[in-house]
């Protein structure tokens, strides 16, 4: 990708990753980017193509194959006043750097009494549906929703990916940005410099019968399910949280004041998921709004299968969402 390509605004999700990093680096000389094969090679998924040509090896740095080193270097650079963007090739590999993320990155500001902040943006490619098998396809965002000190964003569109990346880089605290591998071909238009506030959900469509909350790949399937249900006279509001920590509960509760029914769609097993946490909070803070028990559409409690047919069955489908919405309406 030449420098001129970074002026184009009609992009797909894959191209938007590079564009969002480019614009953040152009805006702030303290921002630099590093990870495995992200330089001349353009990244393992070609999501960072062209950045090395524009910024050179000083600001776009290839690293050894060591997630511990990547996260550790980001912590050190941030403590010294830089704003690093670090890439974990597959989100699953964050497990190798779990101590650095959970015990250092998340807690450094707290343990220094606010004297040191860590403005680290950690990018991670997550999600199932691309045939990468059990160790490369997990919904890793769910590992970190219960760790105080981390902000977690999960953009599902080009516009949200760009805007949340700008917000993440400017944030004075660590932000984990999860980029879903199956969305690389999704298209959209970026507005240069646009910022999507962290902690603000998006109401994708409105309807008076059921509130569906879904993120990333599931957001798109929820919209498809809602369109199908329109033909049956069931009208759904679809909310994309965009940010999982902090979560915009108020937008969900405001919708429930209209619909009184909740269906949450999440990739991965229910236990320990952001969807289960949302259902628990709604039960605690909005129980009186509900006319039916909330439903959680999720994956079986198994690793992500490798076989295409099994992986397809493991992920919540449009049919699964439609069935749960019908059930909650008929309650």
Image (tube, rainbow, N blue to C red):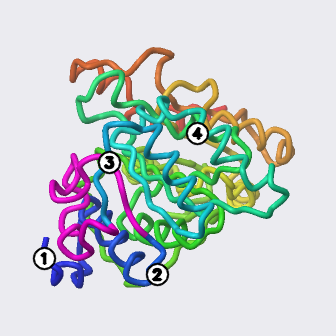
Mark 4 Cα within 10 Å, few/some/many (few <14, many 20+)?
many
Mark 2 Cα within 10 Å, few/some/many (few <14, many 20+)?
few
Percent across and percent down for residue 260 are: 72, 49
Image: magenta residue range:
32-59
Secondary element at tag 1: loop
Residue carrying label 4: 100
Q: Residue at x 57, y 62 (%)?
A: 78
Mark 3 Cα within 10 Å, few/some/many (few <14, many 20+)?
some
Q: What is the C-alpha distance between the residues marked 3 and 4?
A: 17 Å
Q: What is the C-alpha distance between the residues marked 4 and 1?
A: 35 Å
Residue carrying label 3: 63
Secondary element at tag 3: loop
Q: In which quarter of the image is residue 90?
A: top left
Please indicate whether residue 266 sits to the left or right of residue 200 in the image.
left
Secondary element at tag 2: loop
Q: Is residue 58 magenta?
A: yes
Which of label 1 and label 2 is nearer to you? 2
């Amino acid at each position: 990708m030449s420098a001129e390509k970074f002026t184009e605004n009609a992009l797909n999700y894959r191209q938007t990753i590079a564009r969002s990093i480019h614009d953040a680096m152009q805006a702030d000389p303290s921002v630099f980017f590093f990870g495995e094969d992200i330089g001349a090679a353009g990244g393992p998924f070609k999501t960072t193509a062209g950045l090395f040509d524009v910024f050179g090896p000083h600001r776009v740095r290839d690293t050894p194959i060591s997630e511990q080193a990547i996260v550790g270097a980001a912590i050190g650079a941030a403590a010294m006043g830089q704003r690093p963007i670090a890439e974990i090739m597959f989100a699953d590999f964050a497990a190798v750097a779990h101590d650095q993320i959970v015990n250092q990155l998340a807690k450094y500001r707290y343990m220094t009494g606010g004297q040191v902040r860590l403005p680290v943006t950690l990018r991670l490619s997550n999600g199932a549906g691309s045939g990468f098998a059990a160790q490369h396809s997990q919904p890793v965002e769910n590992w970190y929703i219960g760790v105080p000190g981390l902000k977690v964003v999960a953009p599902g569109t080009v516009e949200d990916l760009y805007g949340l990346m700008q917000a993440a880089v400017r944030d004075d605290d660590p932000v984990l940005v999860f980029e879903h591998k199956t969305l690389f071909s999704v298209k959209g238009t970026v507005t240069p410099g646009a910022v999507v506030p962290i902690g603000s959900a998006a109401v994708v469509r409105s309807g008076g019968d059921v509130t569906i909350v879904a993120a990333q790949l599931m957001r798109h399937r929820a919209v498809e399910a809602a369109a199908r249900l329109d033909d049956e006279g069931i009208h759904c509001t679809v909310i994309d949280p965009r940010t999982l920590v902090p979560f915009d509960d108020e937008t969900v509760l405001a919708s429930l004041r209209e619909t009184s029914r909740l269906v949450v769609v999440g990739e991965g097993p229910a236990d320990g998921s952001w969807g289960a946490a949302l259902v628990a909070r709604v039960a605690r803070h909005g129980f009186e709004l509900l006319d039916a028990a909330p439903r959680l559409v999720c994956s079986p409690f198994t690793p992500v299968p490798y076989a295409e047919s099994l992986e397809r069955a493991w992920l919540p489908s449009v049919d699964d969402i439609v069935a749960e919405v019908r059930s909650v309406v008929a309650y």
